[in-house]
């Protein structure tokens, strides 16, 4: 039986763990044996019903204090680096690193001679020195890097062993879709699903909504109402969204915000 050891730092309901859930679910159905190492409390917990999956958990959460966040991050890297050696004497084990963040187990995997595969979701080169450094280590440690777009892959210096696999939507979601091009054109609705990060283009999306009143813009944010309101006020975008959370999509212009 094929054996995958998967490392993902923070198990929440954002995009990268949701994509990981689909990937692992597909492999579990094919009979792969999977050890999943991540935190508790997110979408990956929905995989626990599979008998061929064993989940190792640790406490981890973000902090408003960047120093505390970095200390917690480093502690998890040390813990997963040491934990990775549990598979030292097991053959045909692949270390699957989801996102750039689990660098500790990637290093351990290479030291043990395991095959290391990165699933690279973010574009590190627009996120600052910390992520750029992690991308440097990824390119040195990975046997294979899976990118989610050719555009994202173009920023990497490394070209060998780089595969582009675009993200997909869950089948249970696409099965409910019955697209009608004519009615879709008449609705003139632009939808964006995003986390609350500046580099995601949230500001540009809201400003675009103001400049194109003939279209209806809907923004779905994966964050708390408090954090979203604080961001809108600090960015001077509050008035453009009707004051935050909206349950009314009847207004033809502006950006309607959902949490």
Image (tube, grey):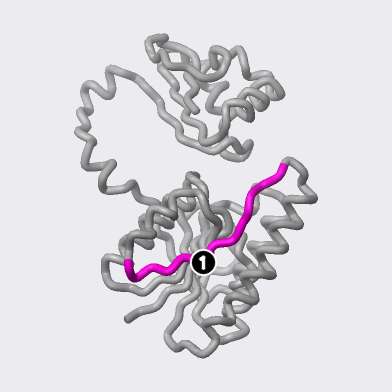
At x 66%, y 47%, the residue is 62
Please say if 64 is above or below 102.
above
Please say if 127 is above or below 116.
above
Crowding near pointer 1: few (<14 within 10 Å), some, many (20+)?
some
At x 27%, y 24%, the residue is 184
- Tell me if I can see residue 162 in this picture: no
Q: Secondary structure at mark 1?
A: strand
> In the image shown, does 63 or 169 lie closer to the viewer?
63
Q: Provide residue 26's location: percent of width, then percent of height.
A: 31, 62
Residue 172 included in the magenta stretch of the image: no
Q: Provide residue 217's location: percent of width, then percent of height.
A: 44, 21
**Quadrant (top left/top right/bottom left/bottom right) for the N terminus:** bottom left
Which residue position is annotated with label 1? 56
At x 62%, y 78%, the residue is 108
> Residue 192 lies in what quarter of the image?
top left
Please say if 221 is above or below 39.
above
At x 33%, y 46%, the residue is 169
- Magenta range is 51-63
> Residue 249 lies in what quarter of the image?
top left
């Amino acid at each position: 039986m094929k054996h995958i050891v998967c490392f993902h730092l923070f198990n929440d309901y954002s995009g990268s763990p949701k994509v990981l859930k689909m990937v692992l679910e597909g492999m579990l159905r094919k009979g792969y044996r999977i050890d999943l190492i991540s935190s508790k409390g997110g979408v990956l917990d929905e995989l626990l019903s599979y008998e061929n999956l064993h989940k190792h958990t640790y406490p981890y959460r973000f902090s408003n204090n960047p120093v505390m966040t970095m200390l917690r991050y480093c502690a998890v890297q040390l813990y997963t680096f040491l934990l990775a050696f549990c598979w030292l004497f097991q053959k045909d084990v692949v270390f699957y690193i989801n996102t750039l963040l689990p660098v500790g187990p990637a290093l351990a995997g290479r030291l043990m001679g395991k095959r290391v595969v990165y699933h690279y979701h973010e574009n590190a080169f627009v996120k600052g020195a910390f992520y750029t450094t992690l991308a440097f280590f990824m390119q040195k440690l990975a046997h294979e890097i899976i990118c989610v777009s050719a555009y994202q892959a173009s920023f990497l210096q490394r070209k060998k062993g780089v595969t582009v696999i675009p993200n997909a939507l869950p089948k249970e979601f696409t099965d409910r879709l019955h697209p009608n091009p004519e009615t879709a054109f008449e609705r003139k609705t632009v939808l964006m699903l995003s986390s609350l990060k500046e580099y995601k283009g949230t500001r540009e999306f809201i400003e675009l909504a103001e400049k194109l009143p003939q279209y209806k813009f809907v923004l779905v944010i994966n964050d708390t109402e408090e954090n979203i309101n604080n961001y809108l006020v600090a960015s001077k975008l509050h008035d453009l969204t009707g004051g935050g959370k909206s349950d009314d999509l009847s207004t033809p212009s502006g950006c309607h915000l959902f949490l």
